[in-house]
Image (cartoon, rainbow, N blue to C red):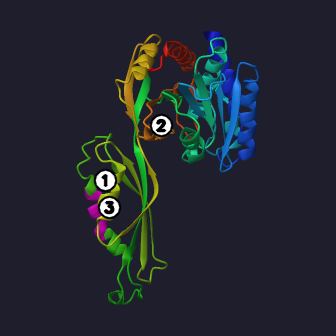
Amino acid sequence: MADKQDQILELTEELVKFKSTNDDLKEINRCLDFIEDYFSEPEFEVNRHENEGIPSMVITFGDDNPDLMLHGHIDVIEAPDEMFQPEREDGKLYGRGTGDMKAGVAALMQVMKDLKDKQPSVGLMIVSDEEKGGFNGAGYLFEEHYSPEFAVSAEPNNQEGYMDIITDQKGILWLKVTAKGLSAHGSRPWNGENAAKKFMDKWPDIRDLFADHKDGEKWVTTVNLGKLESGESTNKVPEITEAWLDIRTAREYPNEEVLEDIRSIEGLEVEASLNESMLSTDHDNRHVQTLKSSAEKFEEECKISRKEPGSDMRFLTEHGIPAVVFGPEGYNAHAPNEYAVIDSLGDYYSIMMDFVSDFEVDR
């Protein structure tokens, strides 16, 4: 298996060299061209898609709607040029996108390549807008073109020490909350109504909606006051105060209930700029259990777990399709020291090859 790991490692390095930041469509298309060339053999059918100018790709063995969909994204966060020159050190591959998630993409590319003789009902979806929300990539493709029975995204495993299967990720609710007052000169505040004070008086009412979710418990609905703007100058009573909230929702307190509760607070205007569902897949789903069995053939321990950050797999939950996040080990996404664990690449490849061979549809 060492040769497969080496091939995946070298393929990852080639992918990392593309500066495919999500605002650079030219480089994203160059990366997609590279992937298309990789699948130039006649056994593969490469379908290029585009929605609102955002490109994506699905590789199949000629099946218009494969039963199993594998998923990865090639868009990355902006970084200095040197981060696009990958470096190996102490069993790690450093560089932008090594962990999030070009190592996972490379591993799935190798899996698809080595399935060409069997040609199962499986596809590989490559998108380029996951870091921007995924609406024109996975969101569009699962809405308009593909409805698999199960899906696996190779987003990195960053829970150290084992290969874990993520069945749950939090929903996302971004709100702009506005308090309006009346402007006046700062020396005569009684002539106005201070919008900042008005918001601060209401903030405990918002915060108390989440008051039961404390004591170190992480898998609960949380609120972060991420940005606050108020006033034009120190000597003027602010007429408008705007606050931006980042709310991450768990099943017990979902998006619609949070939104209803905050909108019920008098004196505030509430606007949702992002309202995205959570990933939620039954732990007992037989494909989840098959994947767990495959993982345990190569890893001592495989846990079914959950993570706070969201991913493209939430789009499948919206359509009632079970999906999981399961990828090779990668750490420090978006940070200067981002890396993938080299030894995990071969194990991940072996697990996915075993899983695909054991995958059976519910028919």
Q: Earlier in the sequence, mark 2 or mark 3?
A: 3
Residue 259 placement: quadrant: bottom left
Counting every numbered tag in the picture gives 3
What's the distance in space between the residues labelled 1 and 2, CA to CA? 21 Å
53 or 29: nearer the viewer: 53
Locate residue 93: give its quadrant. top right
Q: Residue at x 64, y 44 (%)?
A: 79
| Residue 282 % position (x, y) | 36, 29
Image quadrant occupied by the N terminus: top right
> Marks 1/3: CA distance?
9 Å
Along the viewing direction, whichever of 2 and 325 lies nearer the viewer: 325
Q: Residue at x 34, y 43 (%)?
A: 250
Residue 135 in percent (x, y) is at: 56, 47
204 drawn magenta:
yes
Dominant secondary structure (helix, strand or loop) of the stretch shown in magenta: helix
Q: Which mark is residue 262?
A: 3
Q: Which residues lie in the magenta part?
A: 201-208
Label 2 vs label 3: CA separation?
28 Å
Residue holding disc 2: 316
Query: Which residue matches tag 1?
Result: 257
Q: Amino acid at mark 1?
A: Glu
Asked whether 24 or 96 is in front, the reply is 24
Task: Tell me the SS state at disc 3.
Answer: helix
User: Disc 1 or 3, which lies upstream in sequence?
Assistant: 1
